[in-house]
Image (spheres, rainbow, N blue to C red):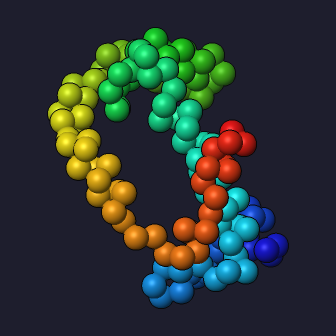
Amino acid sequence: MGGRIGVRPNEPARGDADRHGAIPRARLPDVANGCDRIHDATRNAFGGRWDERKKWGYHILESWKLFFDTGRQIGQITGDFKLEDVVKNDWVDDANSFDAAKVKADAGGFKLADGYTAVDVAGIQARL
């Protein structure tokens, strides 16, 4: 799929889906590769250090301190600010006060387009 500026070679192009959201069968390998990359990238981003975070959106202050200190050391951050002024966990409890069982039920009942149902999610998870 070369020739598209700013798009990785295996990334499905916009417009590949039909008007109902189905991906043409010829594009299924690219859909699976895209799902594989997304799953791999989000697995650690959203689940990392869960034993310390315990809730969605919770910020580990020591991690952000390291991030900002490193940014200062390499010259990407030149301004001065207090960590507590920019990294907050004030709304974490409110953001987590949703009905997880309902979300899971709604997601489980969602009908995917045929192109996506053909993706072997278990196979992708096994490779990670």
The image quadrant where one finds the N terminus is bottom right
* Position in image of residue 6 (x %, y %): 70, 64
Asked whether 32 or 61 is in front, the reply is: 32
Question: Which image quarter: residue 44?
Answer: top right
Q: Residue at x 46, y 70 (%)?
A: 112
* Position in image of residue 50 (x %, y %): 44, 22
In this view, 12 is above or below 72: below
Q: Residue at x 68, y 72 (%)?
A: 28
Residue 78 visible at all: no
Q: Residue at x 78, y 65 (%)?
A: 9
Asked whether 31 or 3 is in front, the reply is: 31
In this view, 99 is above or below 64: below
Question: Which image quarter: residue 17?
Answer: bottom right
Residue 67 visible at all: yes
| Residue that sits furthest to the bottom in the current view | 19
Left or right, 35 with respect to 110, comes to right
Left or right, 38 with respect to 123, comes to left
In this view, 75 is above or below 127: above
Q: Residue at x 41, y 15 (%)?
A: 52
* Position in image of residue 15 (x %, y %): 58, 82
Asked whether 2 or 72 is in front, the reply is: 2
* Position in image of residue 116 (x %, y %): 56, 68
Left or right, 85 with respect to 5, comes to left
The image quadrant where one finds the C terminus is top right
Left or right, 92 with respect to 33, comes to left
In this view, 37 is above or below 16: above
